[in-house]
Amino acid sequence: MIRIGIQPKTAQRLDLGPDAWLLYREATAIENEAGQAAARDFFRKARDGAAALADYGLGEQALDAYATDSALSAGLSSVVSLTEIGLLCISEWHGVGNEAGEPLELNRSNLCAMMRDPGLFAVLRERLLARLFAIDDEGNGSKLSRNGAQAGADDIARDAETPEAPAHSGGEA
């Protein structure tokens, strides 16, 4: 059985470091799709001009590098997508500042700068997308069977047999 209509968790605090935190809630499938659509839109706009790059705190040279390298392009798409999901799911932050230590407001450019940090990106992706990756925790989905097939599916191979240990010849080794 799957259960539908389960509401997202309320806002949770995520400590980022000494006196730095943010309030977030886990993304729904709608917010995830909105983030991915925003990433596609970003690339379409970026090809037409630099305004889209400035929204994310990126320079024109970034687009040239990402346009010629598919791995970098995929990485940028992930950062832009998670930035958009974050804008929908992060309600507040505190203790986030620039290099001079001045507080930064929560906006697209500043959040994208945070997402470009690999450690923070990994933590935020895990937290923001937790509902999308952990349906078993709420009883939705199927646990895997002992042979790796979905629960209830027929086995396609019999269990492997354990070979017998060779008989000892009686002499000392």
Image: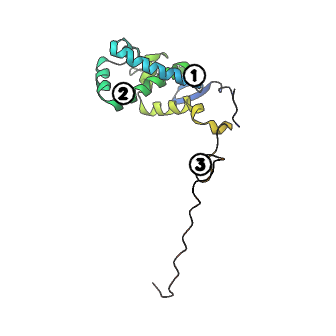
Q: Nearer the viewer, residue 150 or 26?
A: 150
Looking at the rendered structure, the kind of residue marked 1 is Ile
- Determine the image quadrant of residue 50: top left
Q: Which mark is residue 73?
A: 2
Q: Earlier in the sequence, mark 2 or mark 1?
A: 1
State the CA–CA distance, disc 2 to disc 3. Answer: 35 Å
Distance (Cα) linking label 1 and label 3: 29 Å
Residue 82 relative to residue 1: left or right:
left
Which amino acid lies under the numbered mark 3 shown in the image of this protein? Ala
Camera-side residue: 27 or 163?
A: 163
- Tell me if 59 is positioned left or right of 28 in this view: left
Q: Is residue 94 visible?
A: no
Up-down: is 83 above or below 168? Answer: above
The answer to whether the residues at label 2 and label 3 have Cβ atoms under 8 Å apart is no
Residue carrying label 3: 149
Which structural element holds mark 3?
loop
Relative to residue 34, is residue 118 depicted above or below? below
Q: Quadrant of the N terminus?
A: top right
Residue at x-position 52% and y-position 19%: 87
* Pair 2/3: label in front: 3
Amino acid type at image mark 2: Ser
Earlier residue among tags 2 and 3:
2
**Which circle marks residue 30 in the picture?**
1
Disc sitting over residue 61 in the figure: none
Q: Position of residue 113 (x, y in %)?
A: 41, 23
